[in-house]
C-alpha cells in the first residue's frame, strides 16, 4: 500500500529527466569531445607502437641491403620550393624499378655539390643502359644535378609532404616545447576524465535519491485504522 504522496515520485523523476537544451548540448558536446580525444590518443599510440616496432626490427635485423620501407626527412634547403618548402617534411616509401619522369624521389647524392648528402629532387628523365639511372633537378634550381642517380642510391619515392613539421620537431626537441605540447594536454585529459567520472557518479546518486524520496511503506493494520478514522488519504492498489 502506498500513500498518495508517492505520486510525487513520478513528478520528481519527470522533472529530473526534463533536461534543458543547453544541458543537453553540453552533454552531447562532452561525449563528442571524449570520443575524439580517445580516438586521437588511440591513433597516436598505435603510430608510436608501429614506429617503435619498425625501428627495433630494422636495427636488430637490418633491411637486407634495401632502403627502409618508410622514411621521413625534413627539408633544409629551398631547392624544391614551392613544391616542398624549407622545414617541410617528406615521407618516402621504398622505391620500385618503375620510377618515372616527374616523380619526386629522396636519394643519396653523388653530385659533387651534395656528395653523400640525402637529397629530395624531381626526376627529369630515366636512363636504362643496362642499369637504371635518373637525371634529377630541384624545382627551384635552374640546372639539373650534375650526376645521375643510380637506382641503388634511391631511398624512396615521396608520397606525402607535411608542411612546417620541421618547426614542430625543433620545438618539441626543447623541454619547454615537450611540456606544452605533450605533457600538459595529457594531464588535462586525465583530469577531465576524472572530473567526468566524478560527475557521473554524483548524477547516479541523485537519480537514486529521486527514486526513493517521499515513499511511505505502510502496514495493512495502519491502513485499516486510518480508514476507520475517516482518513481517506490512502488508495488501495
Image (spheres, grey):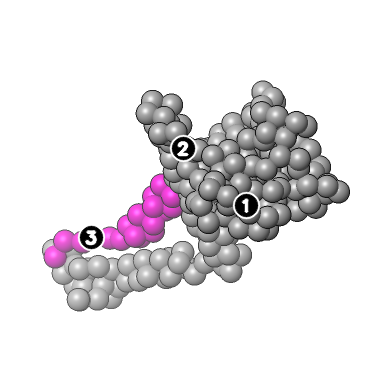
Asked whether, in this view, residue 57 is left or right of residue 77, the answer is left
Q: Earlier in the sequence, mark 2 or mark 3?
A: 2
Report the residue at 28% width, 75% height from top.
232
Q: Quadrant of residue 213?
A: bottom left
Q: State the SS at label 2.
A: loop
Residue 158 placed where, x, y %? Answer: 61, 50
Q: Quadrant of residue 72?
A: top right
Q: Which residue is identified by label 3? A: 217
Q: Which residues are magenta?
A: 199-220
Residue 91 placed where, x, y %? Answer: 60, 46
Q: Quadrant of the N terminus?
A: bottom left
Q: Which residue is identified by label 2? A: 66
Query: Which residue lies most toward the front here?
Result: 129
Asked whether, in this view, residue 45 is left or right of residue 9, the answer is right
**Label 3 environment density (alpha carbons within 10 Å; few <14, some 14–19, many ≥20):** few
Residue 162 lies, with reference to residue 53, above or below; the image says: below
Instruction: State whether the magenta stretch is mostly helix, strand or loop.
Output: helix
Q: Which residue is identified by label 1? A: 127
Distance in Å between CA atoms under marks 3 and 1 = 95 Å
Residue 17 placed where, x, y %? Answer: 45, 67
Closest to the observer, 28 or 68: 68
Report the residue at 72% width, 44% height from top.
88
Q: State the SS at label 1.
A: strand
The reply to whether the C-beta atoms of the residues labelled 1 and 2 are less than 8 Å apart is no
Report the residue at 72% width, 35% height from top.
111
Q: Is residue 104 visible?
A: no
Q: State the SS at label 3.
A: loop
Q: Quadrant of residue 54?
A: top left
**Label 1 environment density (alpha carbons within 10 Å; few <14, some 14–19, many ≥20):** few
Residue 115 lies, with reference to residue 190, above or below; the image says: above
Amino acid at each position: 500500500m502506498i500513500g498518495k504522496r508517492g505520486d510525487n515520485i513520478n513528478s520528481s523523476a519527470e522533472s529530473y529527466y526534463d533536461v534543458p537544451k543547453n544541458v543537453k548540448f553540453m552533454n552531447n558536446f562532452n561525449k563528442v569531445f571524449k570520443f575524439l580525444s580517445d580516438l586521437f590518443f588511440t591513433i597516436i599510440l598505435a603510430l608510436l607502437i608501429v614506429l617503435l616496432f619498425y625501428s627495433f626490427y630494422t636495427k636488430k635485423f637490418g633491411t637486407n641491403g634495401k632502403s627502409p620501407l618508410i622514411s621521413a626527412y625534413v627539408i633544409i634547403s629551398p631547392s624544391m620550393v614551392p613544391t616542398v618548402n624549407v622545414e617541410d617534411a617528406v615521407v618516402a616509401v621504398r622505391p620500385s624499378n618503375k620510377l618515372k619522369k616527374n616523380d619526386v624521389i629522396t636519394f643519396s647524392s653523388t653530385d659533387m655539390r651534395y656528395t653523400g648528402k640525402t637529397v629530395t629532387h624531381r626526376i627529369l628523365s630515366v636512363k636504362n643502359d643496362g642499369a637504371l639511372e635518373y637525371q634529377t633537378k630541384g624545382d627551384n634550381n635552374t640546372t639539373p644535378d650534375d650526376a645521375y642517380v643510380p637506382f641503388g642510391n634511391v631511398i624512396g619515392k615521396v608520397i606525402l609532404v607535411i608542411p612546417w613539421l620541421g618547426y614542430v620537431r625543433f620545438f618539441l626537441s626543447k623541454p619547454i616545447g615537450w611540456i606544452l605540447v605533450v605533457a600538459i594536454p595529457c594531464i588535462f585529459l586525465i583530469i577531465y576524465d576524472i572530473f567526468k567520472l566524478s560527475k557521473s557518479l554524483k548524477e547516479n546518486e541523485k537519480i537514486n535519491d529521486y527514486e526513493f524520496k517521499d515513499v511511505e511503506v505502510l502496514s495493512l493494520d495502519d491502513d485499516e485504522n486510518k480508514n476507520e478514522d475517516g482518513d481517506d488519504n490512502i488508495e488501495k492498489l
